[in-house]
Amino acid sequence: MKRLILSLTLLWLGCASLFAQNWYQVGFKIGTSFPISRNYSLEGDRLTGLLDGEFNVFFRAGKIIYGEVGIGYAFYKGDFTNDNVGFSNVRVETRHLQLPVKAVANLKLGKSVTFLPFVGIIYQPVLKVTDNGIGYDKKSINTNQTLLTGGIDLKFGPIILGANYRCSLKPFFRYKEGAKFQYINICAGFQF
């Protein structure tokens, strides 16, 4: 019965969205990140370089305050060093699924400019960790990260430019004491 009610509700919302102007928004974003914290453990593991990218699609529904859900893919190629253990600039790549859930305010600044501040969470499970020879794998890192995020998007017609802060709720390593990683993400996108 619950599935039937949920299915009928979703069907009704989908049909209503076809006739309601500005009731929903659909689009995509691509982005990259810059780390704020580089020390990943109290045992000397630190990030010395980062190359990353992400691609996300989103769906927003609402009028002034939107609920947003999405799905995406992210990769992080980091160079790690640990002087205590004796490795330097070892490349570790992780690939992630991203499932963001956000609350987004829709504030018109002009005819074609919109200010979109938002807050939310991003559930980010690891899909793959490359072989690296230093023991960074799915057993040693936290494979199901949840990130808090807050930021702003500016929409110029269909073009979106944005920046946001992201902070993990868990440390990078599963069995080591350390900092929760933080970074600034910048993105560009398109809204249909």
Image: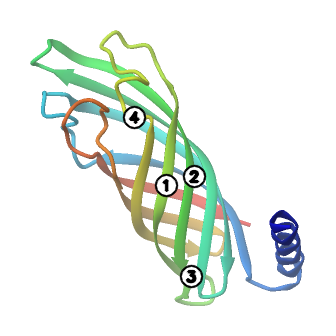
Q: Are marks 4 and 3 in contact (CB under 8 Å)?
A: no
Amino acid type, residue under disc 1 in the picture = Ile
In front of the other: 94 or 177: 177
Q: Secondary structure at mark 4?
A: strand
The residue positioned 34% from the left and 52% from the top of the image is 169
Q: Which residue is mark 4?
A: 51
Q: Are marks 3 and 1 in contact (CB under 8 Å)?
A: no
Q: Position of residue 133 (x, y in %)?
A: 34, 9
The residue positioned 61% from the left and 68% from the top of the image is 68
* Mark 3 or mark 1, whichever is nearer to me: 1
Question: Mark 2 or 4 closer to N-term?
Answer: 4
Q: Which residue is mark 2?
A: 99
Q: Secondary structure at mark 1?
A: strand
User: Residue 122: which disc?
Assistant: 1
Q: Position of residue 28 (x, y in %)?
A: 65, 57
Left or right, 32 with respect to 100, comes to left
User: Residue 15: which disc?
Assistant: none
Amino acid type, residue under disc 3 in the picture = Val
The residue positioned 73% from the left and 83% from the top of the image is 22
Question: Mark 4 or 1 closer to N-term?
Answer: 4
* Mark 4 or mark 1, whichever is nearer to me: 1
